[in-house]
Amino acid sequence: MKIYCFIDDESTGLLHVVAVSAEGTAMCGHLSSSVGFAKHDIGITSEWKHDIYKEVYPDGYELVWVDEPYTSKEVKDALQKNRPDLSTKEMDEWFAAWAKQEGGQGEVPHGRVEP
């Protein structure tokens, strides 16, 4: 099972990094001070959080770091499964607003991903 790890919010001055499986399960999150620490804290470059991943996927998993989650079809598909309450149109609007926020131009309408 692929687990996508990415930063979904930088608005507080810290980076909110999350891990979401391809099937839409929000696995965990962490506040980090830099991208390097975010990768460590979510388990990309360390063993942190792997106990959580192994508990849900004991037969194996693959962590995938996504630099630009707001342009990733895989992340979008996973988040659509995570947020079935949002229509495809609302999800498209969420991703468009997310991309603008990354450029410093707006707020994400449906908030950040919460495990």
Image: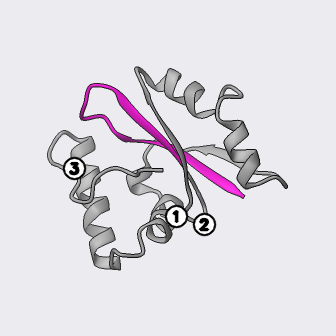
Q: CB of mark 3 within 8 Å of CB of mark 1? A: no
How far apart are the alpha carbons under marks 1 and 2? 6 Å
What amino acid does circle 2 point to? Glu
Q: Which residue occupies the foreground of this view, 53 or 71?
A: 53
> Magenta residues, as a range?
1-19
Whether 80 is drawn above or below 55: the answer is below
Residue 96 in which image quadrant? bottom left
Instruction: Report the side of 19 relative to 71 (left or right).
Output: right
Q: Earlier in the sequence, mark 3 or mark 1?
A: 1
Q: Earlier in the sequence, mark 1 or mark 2?
A: 2
Q: Under tag 3, what secondary structure?
A: helix
Please identify the dominant SS of the magenta region.
Answer: strand
| Residue picked out by circle 1 | 78
Which numbered disc covers residue 100?
3
* x then y, percent, for residue 93: 25, 67
What amino acid does circle 1 point to? Ala
**Mark 3, residues whose alpha carbon is within 10 Å: few (<14), some, or many (≥20)?**
some
* x then y, percent, for residue 28: 54, 44
Q: Under tag 2, what secondary structure?
A: loop
Q: Earlier in the sequence, mark 3 or mark 2?
A: 2
Q: Residue at x 67, y 44 (%)?
A: 63
* x then y, percent, for residue 7: 42, 39
Whether 115 is drawn above or below 16: the answer is below
Q: Residue at x 28, y 77 (%)?
A: 89
Whether 24 is drawn above or below 49: the answer is below
Q: CB of mark 1 within 8 Å of CB of mark 2? A: yes
Q: Quadrant of the N terminus?
A: bottom right
| Residue picked out by circle 2 | 23
Which numbered disc covers residue 95?
none
What amino acid does circle 3 point to? Lys
